[in-house]
Image (tube, helix red, strand yellow):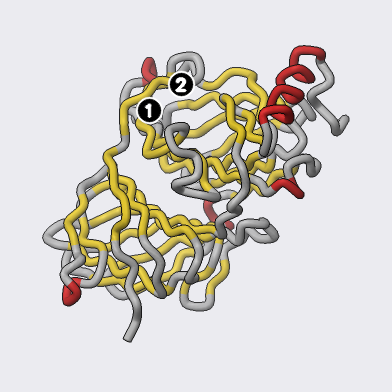
Amino acid sequence: MRRYRSIAYQAQSVPTMEGAGVKLRRAFGFRDPSRFDPFLLLDDFRGDEPDDYIKGFPWHPHRGIETITYMLEGSAEHGDSLGNKGVIGPGAVQWMTAGSGIIHQEMPKPGEDGRMGGFQLWANLPRASKMMDPRYQELDADQIPEVEIEGGRVKVVAGSVAGVRGPVQDVVIEPEYLDLELGPGAVYEHPTTPGHTQIAYVVTGQASFGAQDEGRSQQVPARTVLLFGDGEALRIETGDEPVHALLISGKPLKEPIAWQGPIVMNTQEELATAFEEYQRGTFIKVKN
């Protein structure tokens, strides 16, 4: 019998303002950095009014982490200190490994209907990889495979579903990043890696997570983040309405975390060095 994962922690995302005045909802981040290890932060930045997001996220540094931007609607124009630039369009993903340091900006733009929406996930890098050279894995919507399942579909950014692997690979934390849509009355069971951190974020609709016959199933509304206990599979059941959710997992690092703003290191000394280098203009280690 499969050992299903049950909910260990859940919370509604919280309205927050970031960047130059972007209104978003934070699912988790900053309060307890070890709870979601190896993940640090998840922001839901969907908006109907351009004034709520158009000022974007001007130039700022990152070191020691990976930032994963996934757009649903509208787009995000990006550029960095190494001369890279481009546009993350609807359905596209940018998996940016900041490594030793990068300075970049992300400027959201509305679609034709004025809407913009997406998510940004921060994943921690292990001590041995924190000072690696920065890199990108950029994927257009048509590069992300979609798997039809009973009652719905799954877009596979990283990890695998029914033998179909996502295009994001060679990442230390062995991540899984899935975009799941289920219709009414559907049941989906997804195998999970024991020992890996498993997260779900309900984008729209509501669903039950867990094994009903074990008394651990629970209806969860939209804009809720879930952290699961260990197990071999994740069971999701919908009711009378469709559900859209993100399923995210990764291998915990179990390392010390020293975190301030956009920089995450292992010690306070390393953190202080990073900010000193930023002030002195020696933050960037790789030249274009």
Residue 18 marker: 2
**Which x, y percent locates residue 141?**
53, 51
Query: What SS does tag 1 mark?
Result: strand
Query: What SS does tag 2 mark?
Result: strand
In the rendered view of the protein, which quadrant contains the N terminus? Answer: bottom left
State yes or no: discs 1 and 2 in contact (Cβ < 8 Å): yes
Q: Residue furthest left?
A: 240
Q: Is residue 218 left or right of residue 80?
A: left
Residue at 12 percent of width and 60 percent of height: 240
Question: Does residue 174 sit above or below 118 in this rendering?
Answer: below
Residue at 49 percent of width and 56 percent of height: 177
Question: Does residue 46 sit above or below 197 in this rendering?
Answer: above
Q: Is residue 156 left or right of residue 105?
A: left
How many labels sit on residues?
A: 2
Q: Which is more N-terminal, label 2 or label 1? A: 2
**Which x, y percent locates residue 231?**
39, 71
Q: Is residue 121 left or right of residue 66?
A: left
Q: Amino acid at mark 2?
A: Glu
Residue 24 marker: 1
Residue at 68 percent of width and 34 percent of height: 267
**Which x, y percent locates residue 66?**
62, 42
Crowding near the residue tagged with mark 2, few <14, some 14–19, many ≥20 C-alpha atoms within 10 Å:
some
Q: Residue furthest right?
A: 287
Measure the C-alpha gap from mark 1 to mark 2.
Answer: 8 Å
In the rendered view of the protein, which quadrant contains the C terminus? Answer: top right
**Which x, y percent locates residue 61?**
67, 24
| Foreground residue among 134 and 216 | 216
Q: Amino acid at mark 1?
A: Leu
Residue 236 marker: none
